[in-house]
């Protein structure tokens, strides 16, 4: 979201950004360089009352919990000043606010979907082991399957992050006006090759998101022991924001839990192989694009790599089988030439298809006809 804002601003657009924030949070100076920022300091945490209200209204709880009086007041107050050509709602949770602004002020509205929430909930329900949680998530899935396509169909344009998610959406509603605009990535300087003796595997993720932790524990339990048999000196570096009890409980000298780091470049400098073992989710994993942009070889599950224009064996390695996943890691750790070849192909893919400059241009091209058609300017 920051980079979409930044690169649209660099193309000459004036942007007003409204966002929820935690009490005490302030907008960074870097963000304020590219837009006018208005923060709404209201809790969007879990609420029993909102759970009950979501069941009574039929609205999924994940949507209901983000509807607050403070945000309604903020967006209406700003929109009433006039001068806005388009409303861009990021995530389905913000869609009700955009619909209300169009109804009240006649502003064209566009929805940016980072994931297809229906698929996300379906996969969560399938993987959740707690029976009570599984029942709750399943009921959320049923409501979301009705709600999401209906809500998306009310927008002037819905942009999905992957073609696969767009196909899933259109399968539920042919009334949606949609297109695919991928996520982008900053193209960093090429990371140095890992030292020849390095056998470091890099896992980067949000450590507070359960599917990431489930994926890592799958790797740790089923894949790493196979790798250790072939590469006894292997090390695993784990970084990311948040904490997980499962990781805190690990007492393995081969695994370094670094937590949040301000700069990941030094991590990539000593990394031989990156891994993305993910079995739940939708949309696109930005971290894979970043890993590829640094010229690093990636081994991912099929869901992890979903939505990215990659080919197994050419610019990435993909497997859902623990033994095959391990074999691909071992092959890369044993061959600097293979790491170099896969990493170079990966970086080339990102440079040609996923730069933020090209993504911002796609958004501009998507906005223009909507604005011209629905709000012709004098």
Image (cartoon, rainbow, N blue to C red):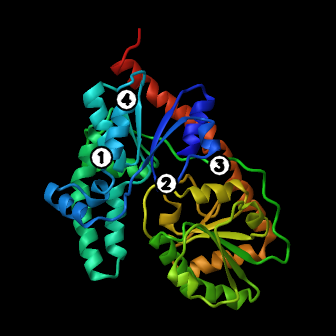
Q: Earlier in the sequence, mark 3 or mark 1?
A: 1
Distance in Å between CA atoms under marks 3 and 1: 41 Å
Pointer 3 and pointer 2: residues touching (CB < 8 Å)?
A: no
Q: Residue furthest top?
A: 378
Q: Which residue is mark 4?
A: 79
Query: To which residue does mark 2 refer?
Result: 307
Rendered view: 282 above or below 149: below
Note whether residue 157 is visible: no
Label 4 crowd bin: few (<14), some (14–19), many (20+), radius 10 Å: some
Q: How many neighbours does mark 1 have within 10 angstroms: few (below 14), some (14-19), or many (20 or more)? A: few
Disc 4 secondary structure class? helix
| Pair 4/3: label in front | 4
Q: Secondary structure at mark 2?
A: loop
Rounded to the nearest angstrom, the CA distance separating label 1 from label 2 is: 36 Å
> Which numbered circle lies on residue 69?
1
Which quadrant of the figure has residue 87?
top left
On the image, the x and y values in percent for residue 93 come to: 35, 50
Q: Which residue is mark 3?
A: 350
Q: Is residue 72 visible?
A: yes
Marks 4 and 2: which is nearer the front?
4
Is 363 on the left or on the right of 333, as rendered?
A: left
* N-terminal-most mark, 1 or 2: 1
Residue lying at the far left in this picture: please name it. 56
- Foreground pick, 223 / 246: 246
The local crowd at label 3, few if under 14, some if 14 to 19, many if 20 or more residues have their Cα within 10 Å, is: many
Reply above or below: 233 against 167. Answer: below
- Tags 4 and 1 touching, CB below 8 Å: no
Between 215 and 259, which is closer to the camera in this rendering?
259
Residue located 25% across and 56% down the image: 145
Q: Rounded to the nearest whole Å, what is the CA distance between mark 4 and mark 1?
A: 16 Å
Q: Residue 284 location, x and y as percent?
A: 50, 55
């Amino acid at each position: 979201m920051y980079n979409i804002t930044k690169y649209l601003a660099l193309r000459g657009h004036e942007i007003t950004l409204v966002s929820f924030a935690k009490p005490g949070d302030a907008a960074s100076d870097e963000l304020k360089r590219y837009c006018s920022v208005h923060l709404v300091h209201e809790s969007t945490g879990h609420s029993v009352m909102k759970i009950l209200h979501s069941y009574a209204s039929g609205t999924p709880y994940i949507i209901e919990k983000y509807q607050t009086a403070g945000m309604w007041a903020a967006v209406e107050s700003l929109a009433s000043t006039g001068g806005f050509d388009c409303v861009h709602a990021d995530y389905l949770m913000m869609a009700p606010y955009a619909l209300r602004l169009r109804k009240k002020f006649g502003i064209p509205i566009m929805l940016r979907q980072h994931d297809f929430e229906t698929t996300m909930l379906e996969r969560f329900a399938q993987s959740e082991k707690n029976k009570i949680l599984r029942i709750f998530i399943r009921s959320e899935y049923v409501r979301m399957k009705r709600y999401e396509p209906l809500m998306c169909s009310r927008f002037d344009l819905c942009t999905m992050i992957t073609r696969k998610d767009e196909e899933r959406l259109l399968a539920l509603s042919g009334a949606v006006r949609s297109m695919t605009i991928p996520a982008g990535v900053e193209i960093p300087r090429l990371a140095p090759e890992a030292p020849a003796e390095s056998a470091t595997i890099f896992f980067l993720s949000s450590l507070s998101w359960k599917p990431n932790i489930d994926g890592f524990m799958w790797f740790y339990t089923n894949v790493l022991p196979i790798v250790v048999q072939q590469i006894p000196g292997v090390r695993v570096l784990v970084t990311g924001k948040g904490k997980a009890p499962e990781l805190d409980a690990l007492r393995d000298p081969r695994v370094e839990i670094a937590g949040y780091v301000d700069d990941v470049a030094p991590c990539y400098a000593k990394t031989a192989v990156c891994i993305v073992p993910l079995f739940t989710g939708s949309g696109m994993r930005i971290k894979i694009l970043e890993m590829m942009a640094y010229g690093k070889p990636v081994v991912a599950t099929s869901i992890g790599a979903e939505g990215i224009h990659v080919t197994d064996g050419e610019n990435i390695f993909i497997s859902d089988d623990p033994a095959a996943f391990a074999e691909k890691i071992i092959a890369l750790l044993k061959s600097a030439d293979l790491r170099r070849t896969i990493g170079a192909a990966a970086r080339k893919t990102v440079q040609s298809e996923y730069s933020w400059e090209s993504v911002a241009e796609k958004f501009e091209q998507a906005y223009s006809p909507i604005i011209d058609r629905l709000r012709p300017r004098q």
